Amino acid sequence: MQKIESPAAFIGKDDNNLISFGSGQPDLPPPEAVYKILPTYRNFKYGLIKGQENLRQALAAQYQNAKADNFVITNGASEALDLTLRALYQPGAKVLLPKPYYYSYPFNVRLAGMEPVFYELVDGKIDFEQFKKEILGCQAVLINSPGNPTGTVQDLAVLKKIEKLGQKLNIYIISDEVYKDLIYERENYLMEGKKVLTLNSFSKTYAMCGFRVGYVYAREKELIDKIVEMKTHTSMNTNILGQEMAYEATKVPRSYIDSQTKIWKERRDLIYNGLWELGLEVWKPEGAFYVFPKMKNPGKVVSDLYFKYHVITYDGTWFGDEQRVRFSYALDAEKIKEGLRRLGEYLKKEYREN
Amino acid sequence: MQKIESPAAFIGKDDNNLISFGSGQPDLPPPEAVYKILPTYRNFKYGLIKGQENLRQALAAQYQNAKADNFVITNGASEALDLTLRALYQPGAKVLLPKPYYYSYPFNVRLAGMEPVFYELVDGKIDFEQFKKEILGCQAVLINSPGNPTGTVQDLAVLKKIEKLGQKLNIYIISDEVYKDLIYERENYLMEGKKVLTLNSFSKTYAMCGFRVGYVYAREKELIDKIVEMKTHTSMNTNILGQEMAYEATKVPRSYIDSQTKIWKERRDLIYNGLWELGLEVWKPEGAFYVFPKMKNPGKVVSDLYFKYHVITYDGTWFGDEQRVRFSYALDAEKIKEGLRRLGEYLKKEYREN
């Protein structure tokens, strides 16, 4: 078996015969409005390190009591997380992460010089009693709802209890909300509170992955200043044209997002039902565009599916779960059906022998 | 006196009455070719973390024996430096920097968990005998030629000796060559060798500062892999449209760069002669677009010039030199003249009282 070590092996791969349940890359294009400014665009100078004023103002309008100065525009949510962790760095500090986790989290925590520790999700959900114990002594905790790779949305009551706990214990809450607009089963909830650091991006809601525009929203001025100071030396302003395109996206009517969500939901139903029919154990995703069925020996499954069936899937092990495989359903219905067909073939022919 | 703490205070400031000798931001626009692709551009997906193939291939053609796989495209040279330092991190390691230095260097070394140490430039030039001693025990050394804030270009013979020394001592040489195309007095030289890590960007040569496209060129595959792995988690691909614009820039004929250099040289002569005529002690810049005259109490000079004369200059202290002020001449001749006039007024009226 040729082992596939990480998702990096797949990024940017694309060919017609390949069905990719891999990357969290929407296949539907961004709203046309984001391209409309391009023909006459002629700026070229450095922008403000914290990001363009118009974009930060538009974002502030999306959150309660927020001001433009609470935001730093970053190279995607990835840089938002990296800078946030570097800003929170303390020697010997621990950062509490969900498990399973988005595969970058533990890497980023270590790269920022801190130690990742974990709270176990139960079928993708936070067990608050357990969480309460794990959080003690941590510098920060990361919440990711809707979650990657789980596709779950955390209970509103639990999120509110976590806000209070962070406040009481003086522990930062990093809330990664990049899937905030992709929710199928319940109301959206944006975490609030003085100790909350919200991460977000234009990649998922507006399919602008390649343009790398994200942001961090922090309530404490001191943290914003620290992040801006670091960004001055580590990347300077985020691509000015990307920011202008993102600003255009903020003006797109809500109906655009709703129409996208409708499509995601149909695909969610298609793949969720399909996996059940193939006999796999899986919970119903509530948000994002991932489904996370239980499978034996996921490393072999991922390798077999890729090399023999031209289907990309992600090994749960990369996300801290050795019993599951992640399927992204960010691809069109016909491809999902074909992918399910190939998966079915694999399950019938080879999987049982695992 | 209202003290100005760092260049960050000035970034993005712009008004008609302000003469800015501050930021290293070319005032002349990028070649029109970089905008030509915009009207029909419709891509949006994640790109390869290491950067688009076409751009990396075009860059490889600019260096001897280089291959596309030796390059990682980054969010400007800033991210190239940040990732390079993080990749070279060893506990307790020292990185040898020039002094005076580009103001980000010591910050970046510390942020990457290492200790900055310094080799003193003599009138902007490397004293090789001194350098030879300082380099011992360092993990890496940084060379910046043409240099910021000095405007000097290091001797070819010295650069070649440094290449050999790095090789012999097994010490990495980080060569920041962002001003490689802006040289007025001598031939350009791109550092070579197995231990050399070259940083560069499209910001200065093509005036594309705001688009943030830079790169690191490393000869060791292991280092490239490490940098790509980090970038996968800390920012992912560099803005795909910025990369495509940079690729268009690589196709612009050499005559474009030559015509720009001619303009920079005229401005260099204008400001260099002007400063001499005002009685300031200054060496003749050989490259980049900075001039670095000696001035008493530079903190006060920078503050006075800004608040009373609406002239932005940068305090030499920010670059590790407490006896000089940096003037960028990346602005048009008329503005340079007006700035010199205001400076003359200041020198006559107030400076002597310092």
Image (spheres, coloured by chain):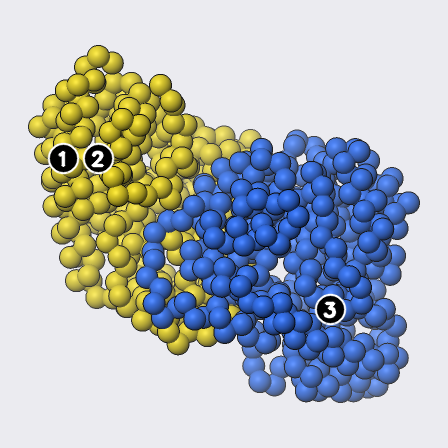
Chain colours: A yellow, B blue
Which quadrant: the N terminus of chain B?
A: bottom right
Callout 1 and callout 2 share a chain = yes
The Cα–Cα distance between marks 1 and 3, rounded to whole angstroms, is 61 Å
Output the chain of dot 3.
B
Which mark is first along the chain, 2 or 1? 1
Quick check: A39 left or right of B344? left
* Residue type at the position of mark 1: Tyr
- Give the number of the disc on residue B290: 3
Task: Please provide percent x and percent y for residue B242.
Answer: 46, 60
The answer as to whether the residues below labels 3 and 2 share one chain is: no
Give the Cα distance between marks 1 and 2: 7 Å
Residue located 53% across and 36% down the image = B225
Q: Which numbered dot is residue A120?
A: none
Residue annotated with mark 2: A291
Helix, strand or loop under label 1: helix
The answer, for residue B326, to whether it is visible in the render is: no
